[in-house]
Amino acid sequence: MRKAVVLLSGGIDSATTLAIARAQGFACYALSIDYGQRHRSELVAAARIGEFLQASDHQFVQLDLTTLAASALTNATIAVPTDGVSEGIPVTYVPARNTVMLSLALAWAEVLESRDIFIGVTAVDYSGYPDCRPDYIAAYEKMANLATKAGREGEPFTIHAPLIDLSKHAIIRSGMRLGVDYGLTVSCYQADDDGRACGLCDACRLRRAGFEAANVPDPTRYQQD
Amino acid sequence: MRKAVVLLSGGIDSATTLAIARAQGFACYALSIDYGQRHRSELVAAARIGEFLQASDHQFVQLDLTTLAASALTNATIAVPTDGVSEGIPVTYVPARNTVMLSLALAWAEVLESRDIFIGVTAVDYSGYPDCRPDYIAAYEKMANLATKAGREGEPFTIHAPLIDLSKHAIIRSGMRLGVDYGLTVSCYQADDDGRACGLCDACRLRRAGFEAANVPDPTRYQQD
């Protein structure tokens, strides 16, 4: 069985990505980054999802970027916007996040002698993020193959981004077909310790709209309920 | 004054790189990664060098890769080779190290609105490392400019690798001209808590040969002295 490293945040997209990697026959090594994000219930969700989807291993890497980053997700003094999805780059942007996460995945893949890395980026609903686009993923893959002994010696790495062209409702439909329990996932940028969502932030709005568009009952537990 | 993020490990190469960035007129933001390396005296050396070369700021990021990595530098059960510099990829190789470090530098550069990142890789004496070659640096820069808002919007990042074509003795001569005190640096893979070098590992051998070839007295303090 070929090994794949799968970045797992605890949200809908990475849970679906893990289910896809597993359905493609990979032994999945789930990797979650604890970078001091405010919505720590995401990491609890990631642990449950890794277990539910039978990851072969699941590691959590601690990476404290608070001294470097000044984005809304890691700096409690910047408010999370709750007035709807806006144009351009959201203020919840964490600098170089996918680049940092893919680099840690690459490190683990090299150790595991895995040549496959899965990341749940989508260019559709989050088009404001530069590091969620196909040209970025292709450039990362090229760089990774020059960075590593295996890549140089004809055993190239592949960065799989199976959701990249999918909208949120298409992602949800794919995951439902593969048996993902979305009740285990947390998307909210300011979920409470119980994993209950605010219902107001960008992530909650996109998630709710996704379940509506997919014609699927929303399994999210809200703080207002 | 333009800002640059400079990766600073505490060895000869990164100290020289910091001096070069400063001589080029950059306000230097030194970044050191504490990834649980065995030679912790390197981090103490990095702090001294950052101060000596008047970095505008110096941050240390904790990143524990011990659960992921199984290389000699982070796993105390694998012996550091002491029988001379060998061909090919050294066993002291840390997976994806430069990729991980550059990604953290990119994150900080984005926050600082710096567009310049300096890394002290050299393709000459360490040709065994795939992530120390010019094609890798070029591919990283291209990826970084697709990963980021600034890069997409016509304010590209430059990855500076000013040592890439220099041998160890040429690096030492450059640094001496710029006033680097190499007595502050630590290269040894197994230095003691005082920063005294073993004199036997690959890093010590390359360092000693570099001072000899540069015709400069070796300021290194050895454990045998």
Image: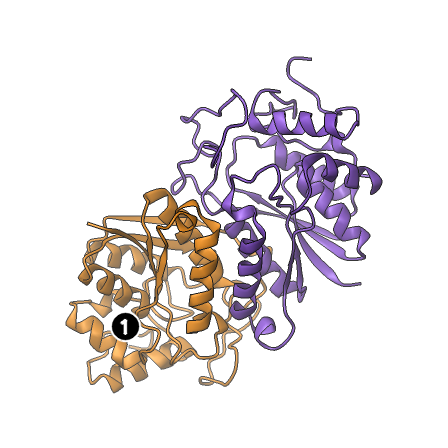
Chain colours: A purple, B orange
Quadrant of res B169: bottom left
Residue assigned mark 1: B221
**Foreground of the two, B197 or A128:** A128
Q: Is residue A47 above or below residue B109?
A: above
Residue A182 x %, y %:
75, 33
Residue A225: % across, % down: 69, 13
Disc 1 packing (10 Å; few <14; some 14–19; many ≥20) = some
**Quarter of the picture holding the C terminus of chain B:** bottom left
User: Which residue occupies 43% across, 35% down?
Assistant: A71
Q: Is residue B66 visible?
A: yes
- B208 with respect to A92 (left or right): left
Percent from the top left, x then y, of residue B117?
34, 57
Q: Classify mark 1: helix, strand or loop.
A: loop
Is A138 or A101 nearer to us in this picture? Answer: A138
Q: Residue at x 39, y 43 (%)?
A: A68
Name the one closer to the observer, B184 or A87.
A87
Q: Is residue A55 visible?
A: no
- The chain holding disc 1 is B
Q: Is residue A214 left or right of residue B189?
A: right
- Asked whether, in this view, residue A142 is left or right of residue A209, the answer is left
- Residue A59 at x, y percent in the picture: 64, 49
Image vertical order of residue A126 relative to residue A217, above or below? below
Q: Is residue A147 above or below residue B206?
A: above
